[in-house]
């Protein structure tokens, strides 16, 4: 079954459900030609390994604490704090406890 993305004007719940840890680490909430909006779940024993995205991205910590390794340093995000990264910047994301973030990725820089 294909994942149903939200349409413009849809309300999106960002709350974690009981089966999140067993089922997935991220969910694409909405996707357009230029942007992808994802809710990510980073568990303490399952970091997101270093990678890079072509487009710019922002990450907002919603729950827990997210540690982002980029530019040779670690930035720790607590709830309601965010980080912006330029496109092409290698980064990894870790958590000392199960944590939720909201990530926005620009897919095709203008």
Image (cartoon, helix red, strand yellow):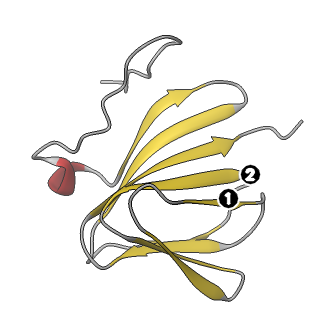
Q: Alpha-carbon neighbours of circle 2 within 10 Å: few (<14), some, or many (≥20)?
A: some
Residue at image location 36% in from the left, 70% down from the top: 65
Q: Please count the marks in the image.
A: 2
Residue 84 is tagged as 1
Q: Height in image: 66 above or below 59?
A: below
Q: Is residue 49 visible?
A: no
Q: Secondary structure at mark 1?
A: strand
Q: Is residue 55 left or right of residue 49?
A: right
For the point 9% across and 46% down, which residue is it? 18
Q: Position of residue 23 (x, y in %)?
A: 21, 49
Quadrant for the C terminus, please.
top right
Give whichever of discs 1 and 2 has the lower sequence position: 2
Q: Is 96 drawn above or below residue 63 in the view shown?
A: below
Q: Is residue 87 above or below residue 45?
A: above
Q: Quadrant of the N terminus?
A: top left
Badges 1 and 2: C-beta atoms under 8 Å apart? yes
Seen as rendered, the residue at the extreme bottom is 72
Looking at the image, which residue sits at the far right? 110
Q: Residue at x 84, y 41 (%)?
A: 109
Most extreme residue toward the left is 18
Disc 2 on helix, strand or loop? loop
Residue under label 2, please give it: 56
Residue 51 in picture, x, y percent from top left: 61, 69
- Residue at 63% of width from left, 24% of height from top? 32
Q: Please state which of residues 63 and 33 is positioned toward the viewer in this rendering.
A: 63
Q: Residues within 10 Å of mark 1 (few under 14, many from 20)?
A: few
Which x, y percent locates residue 62?
A: 37, 52
Asked which quadrant contains residue 75, the reply is bottom right
């Amino acid at each position: 079954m294909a994942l149903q993305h939200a349409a413009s004007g849809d309300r999106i719940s960002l709350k974690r459900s009981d089966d999140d840890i067993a089922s997935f680490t991220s969910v694409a909430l909405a996707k357009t030609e230029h942007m992808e909006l994802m809710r990510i779940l980073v568990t303490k024993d399952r970091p997101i390994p270093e990678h890079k995205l072509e487009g710019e991205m922002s990450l907002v910590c919603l729950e827990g604490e997210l540690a982002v390794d980029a530019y040779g340093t670690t930035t720790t995000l607590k709830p309601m704090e965010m980080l912006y990264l330029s496109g092409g910047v290698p980064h990894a994301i870790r958590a000392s406890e199960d944590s939720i973030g909201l990530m926005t990725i620009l897919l095709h820089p203008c």
